[in-house]
Amino acid sequence: MRRVFWSRRALDEFDEAIGYIAQDSRRAALDVAVRLNDSAERLGEFATGRRGEQAGAYEKVVARTSYVLVYAIDESRNAIVILRVIHMARDRAEE
């Protein structure tokens, strides 16, 4: 099993997403937070997903949410690094 680390950017995006959802529903925000975290931890057990747009990155759609985790495999640390938390409706061409 690999350890899972979150980049500063991914943590900021996580906080921003959960804060936005919580404005309408704290329960929904908690549900999404748990799903994102659980999905990230499962990547440490078995890294699945498609090749990402960024070289060396992969993307995992988080079930029953509108979010994608962008991650990389760091073989030197035997770790998964969560790079981004992106809403599927976001226009990535602007980034």
Image (cartoon, rainbow, N blue to C red):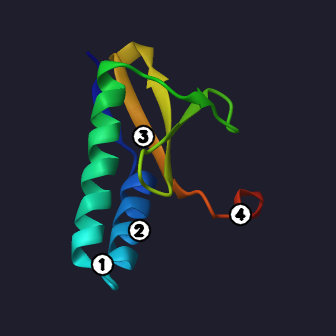
Which type of secondary structure does the marked residue at label 2 adopt? Answer: helix
Which type of secondary structure does the marked residue at label 4 adopt? Answer: loop
Residue 13: numbered disc: none
> Disc 2 or disc 1, which is closer to the eye?
1
How far is the residue under mark 4 from the one under mark 1?
A: 22 Å
Q: Residues within 10 Å of mark 2 (few under 14, many from 20)?
A: some
Residue 17: numbered disc: 2
Q: At which x and y percent is residue 72?
A: 50, 30
Upstream in sequence: badge 3 or badge 1:
1
Q: Amino acid at mark 1?
A: Ala
Residue 82: numbered disc: 3
Q: Name the side, left or right, on which 51 lies relative to 73.
A: right
Residue 91: numbered disc: 4
> Disc 3 or disc 2, which is closer to the eye?
2
75, above or below 88, in the image: above
How far is the residue under mark 3 from the one under mark 2?
A: 15 Å
Upstream in sequence: badge 4 or badge 1:
1
17, above or below 77, in the image: below
How far is the residue under mark 3 from the one under mark 1?
A: 22 Å
